[in-house]
Amino acid sequence: MRYAILLMGAPYSDQASHSALRFARALLARGHRLETVFFYHDGVYNAARLAAPPQDEPHLVDGWAALNAEHGVTLQVCIAAALRRGLMDEREASRHGKSGYSVEAPFELTGLGQLIDLGLQCDRLVTFGP
Amino acid sequence: MRYAILLMGAPYSDQASHSALRFARALLARGHRLETVFFYHDGVYNAARLAAPPQDEPHLVDGWAALNAEHGVTLQVCIAAALRRGLMDEREASRHGKSGYSVEAPFELTGLGQLIDLGLQCDRLVTFGP
Amino acid sequence: MKLHIVNCAPDAGRVVQQALSAMTTDDRLLLIEDGVQGALPSLVDGFSGIEGRLYVLREDLEARGLMSRHDDRVTVVDVDGFVTLTEQAEQTLSWY
Amino acid sequence: MKLHIVNCAPDAGRVVQQALSAMTTDDRLLLIEDGVQGALPSLVDGFSGIEGRLYVLREDLEARGLMSRHDDRVTVVDVDGFVTLTEQAEQTLSWY
Amino acid sequence: MRDGETPAGDLLVILRHGSHGTSWLREGLDAALVGAAFGREVALLFMGEGVLGLLEGQGQGALGQKGTGPTLEMLEMYDIEALYVEEQAMARYGLEQRDFLLAARHLDDTAIAELVERHALVLTF
Amino acid sequence: MRDGETPAGDLLVILRHGSHGTSWLREGLDAALVGAAFGREVALLFMGEGVLGLLEGQGQGALGQKGTGPTLEMLEMYDIEALYVEEQAMARYGLEQRDFLLAARHLDDTAIAELVERHALVLTF
């Protein structure tokens, strides 16, 4: 089946991100396809490229990137939710006249319309809230 | 009196940051001294230098910086909570071998011991949770 | 005397009960943010036992359209009154 | 048949009640994260009416030291079982 | 309006939080508006604390934050006319239809379960 | 131990969440440990869901996240010996002292209010 995940919890603060990553690995292991993880609300903080958790804790940003590298899962971050929270890629940073950036590939900033499309076009959309 | 504020809510997601900033301005207007705002848990996201809220919404990062500029309020961010969440200044970034940074002055990364000191040495510590 | 600050809706778990159980008989309780819902007549009974020591923040009532709807037994203060309450208390505790 | 997923403690507000009120008589409910507390014998009565359709995630029970403490009327599934439940349901709804 | 008239729709957005305290109401409404803008049939259910989001007389936040009143007024423009409110929550907060900015159909638990059942996609906020 | 024996202390940390679901328990414990490391007299009160944080047999999270068990075992090393637990919450979860990793004094509501009263600084997590 074609799955999508909607993640709305901040990393480290809530279990949501860990639950979502664990669920993603389990469904892929069962032979399903995971189209996209969509990050909304505080879930967008999962895309922070400078995250530096202690070495003995799971590194969520790398975990998501690995899903992309190994299984082609796209990582879509709601742009409106992200900009408010200080998450922007190089293109948005230059558009806002800021130096530096806090989001990088494979995460991509996108509109909320993508979420509605995913919800209606995938066989299953599973939400992980805070 | 000497006040300190402990802020533990993420900006935009919860009202906590708005409440804390409003309370800070009110106590300063009444002639009190605000020593420090200490950012812990998801409150550390208030220090994200790239935050770009829509123009018709309050800009919290700038609001905190203004408190520092106008009233000498120090803005202390718990370093352990910040690093996990992708918030680091230039010094930490270079220590972690990363390019770029997500926190800048007047926000300063500091240890949790500062919070305990503030709590015991200031006349009042007021906490704003998520 | 301590000031307890509650920012959660009465329906958002056991936060109100926790605050109440930590209060002594002269402590005060201030409702802010979504906590102001507790000042509605249909919910204010959840605070029985602290009559005269229950406060609610005007600005947060107003923003939610609740200003004319609160129970008379709750004292309305603005943010300056919030500061005053913290001056008068030896310590503040927040329940969120 | 839909799968409802609850990740909140029974004490964390009215989330469980909301999930239950949105369930039809063949829907299922899975407890994950802090929601697994609801499988404790002292709290499981909060789910009366959905006997046989109540599931709890093994990994989250284990991490919390609750594996041997849950009520027998709750079906324990691991994360593979979680995936299976989503396969069998037409849609999932999350209550958080 | 009677329950039986409710058509099946594409997207049901369940709103469980009021204005100002959190961003959930705004973010849920954004999802609904985007769904409608993309041509989907969208319904809204105000549940629990979410019923407070419908109140008349809401204002700005203390730092000038926008409330959700203006967004609610945009619903009609986007052809989102299927509005529902949890009857039990109204009773709990002591509210009646005349307290609300918009007309919404009152639903008991059975009707809520039926409403959820009729939608291909349900998002909870 | 009887209640009357409790001394006044510098810092009381109230823990209202269990392990794994959120970072509150860990962050609250960190504050307590730092306070003790700085030479302060620190007490801990496990309240509400926080009592579950004391359970024996907790493990790692599914992605290998550390639990709070190891941190709890450090409390003694930091001379944090004043541990309290809300009696009502224990009853609610059906727990007894023998279910816990550490010995803690059981408090009813009155005793909780007195404990809070005796501390110069109280932090809630």
Image (cartoon, coloured by chain):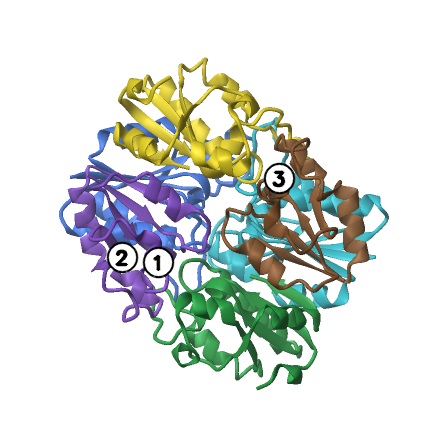
Chain colours: A cyan, B blue, C purple, D brown, E green, F yellow
- Neighbours of disc 2 within 10 Å: few (<14), some (14-19), many (20+): many
> Is F61 on the left-hand or right-hand side of E20?
right
- Label placed on residue C38: 1
The outermost residue toward the left is B31
Q: Which residue is mark 2?
A: C56
Q: Residue furthest right?
A: A31
Task: Check disc 1 and report its element: helix, strand or loop.
Answer: helix
Do callouts 3 and 2 mark residues in contact (Cβ within 8 Å)?
no
Chain at numbered mark 2: C
> Hey, what amino acid is under mark 2?
Val
Same chain assignment for discs 3 and 1: no
Point out residue E50 in the picture as x, y percentages from the top left corner: 48, 66
Residue A78 shows in this picture: no
Q: Which mark is residue D66?
A: none
Q: Are marks 3 and 2 on the same chain?
A: no
Label 1 resides on the chain identified as C
Above or below, B100 against C62 in this view is above
Mark nearer the N terminus (1 vs 2): 1
Report how far apart the C-alphas of labels 3 and 1 lie in the structure.
31 Å
Q: Amino acid at mark 3?
A: Pro
Q: Note whether D26 is above or below F104 in the view shown.
A: below
**B110 displayed left or right of A9:** left
Measuring from the top left, give residue E55's x and y in whole percent.
40, 73
As drawn, the label of residue D41 is 3
Question: Do the residues bearing badges 1 and 2 touch, measured as CB atoms within 8 Å?
Answer: yes
Helix, strand or loop at mark 3: loop
The answer to which of C20 and D83 lies nearer the viewer is C20
